[in-house]
Structure formats: structure tokens, C-alpha cells
Image (cartoon, rainbow, N blue to C red):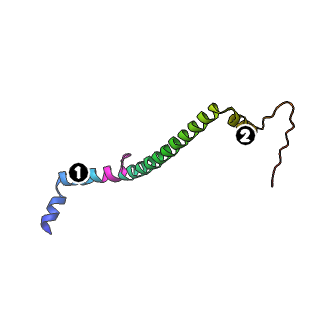
Amino acid sequence: MGKYLNYTKNFYFIFTVLFVVWMVFIDTNDIVSHFKLRAKLRELEKQKEFYQERKEKVTAEREELMSNYELLEKFARERYLMKRKTEDLYVIIEE
């Protein structure tokens, strides 16, 4: 036991222990912050995948709409409630 007490009196040992404690728990780049940032990075990567898939889907729909005039007209009528001059438009809202 006395052998270990000699190490605790050593300046370099004390400095090393304090430095490790500082870097692990107190510093702005501590281990807890790294775990939080790593979790945030995983979440953002999942969001990136979702938005890339969504972008591909929207691009495919856009290409389909621009190539087919009848589909474009149907889309405009349903989504934006557009109509021809000779037509009447009735919107039914279900509760």
C-alpha cells in the first residue's frame, strides 16, 4: 500500500490524473459531448436518406407530369382546384 502512496505524491502522476479528468469531464470537447454529437450525426444521416428518397420520388412525379398533359391537367384540378372557364367548381369538405 505504501508503494501506491508514493505514486500519488508524484507531481507527474497528479498532473496526469487531473489532465485526464479535465479532458474527459470538464473540457468543451468531453466524452459526453462526443456521444451527443455522434447521436445527432446519426439522426441527421437518417434525415438525409429520407429527403434524398423524397427528392427522387418528387423528381419522378415531375417528369411524369411534364410528359403527360392529361395527367398534368388532373393534377392541377385536384391539387390546386383549377377549372376551365365553362365549368363550375364545388368543394365538399367532409368533417
Q: Is residue 67 above or below residue 20?
A: above
Image coords of residue 63 (percent x, y)? 59, 33
Of the image marks 1 and 2, the number of the one nearer the N terminus: 1
The residue at 60%/38% (across/down) is 61
Residue 57 vs residue 73: left or right? left
Q: Amino acid at mark 2?
A: Arg
Image coords of residue 55 (percent x, y)? 54, 39
Per the rendered image, the range of residues in magenta is 21-30
Q: Main secondary structure of the magenta part?
A: helix
Q: Is residue 70 above or below residue 1?
A: above
Q: Callout 2: helix, strand or loop?
A: helix
Disc 1 + disc 2, Cβ < 8 Å: no
Q: Which of the pair 54/66 is nearer the observer?
A: 66
Mark 1 or mark 2, which is nearer to you? Answer: 2
Q: Which residue is mark 1?
A: 15
Q: Residue furthest bottom?
A: 1
Image coords of residue 76 (percent x, y)? 73, 36
Q: Which of the pair 59/35 is nearer the observer?
A: 59
Looking at the rendered image, the quarter that the C terminus falls into is bottom right
Residue 51 vs residue 89: left or right? left
- CA distance separating discs 1 and 2: 69 Å
The residue at 69%/34% (across/down) is 72
Q: Amino acid at mark 1?
A: Phe
Image coords of residue 54 (percent x, y)? 55, 42
Residue 61 vs residue 16: left or right? right
Q: Which residue is mark 2?
A: 79
Label 2, residues with CA under 10 Å away: few <14, some 14-19, many ≥20: few
Q: Residue 40 in magenta? A: no
Q: Quadrant of residue 68?
A: top right
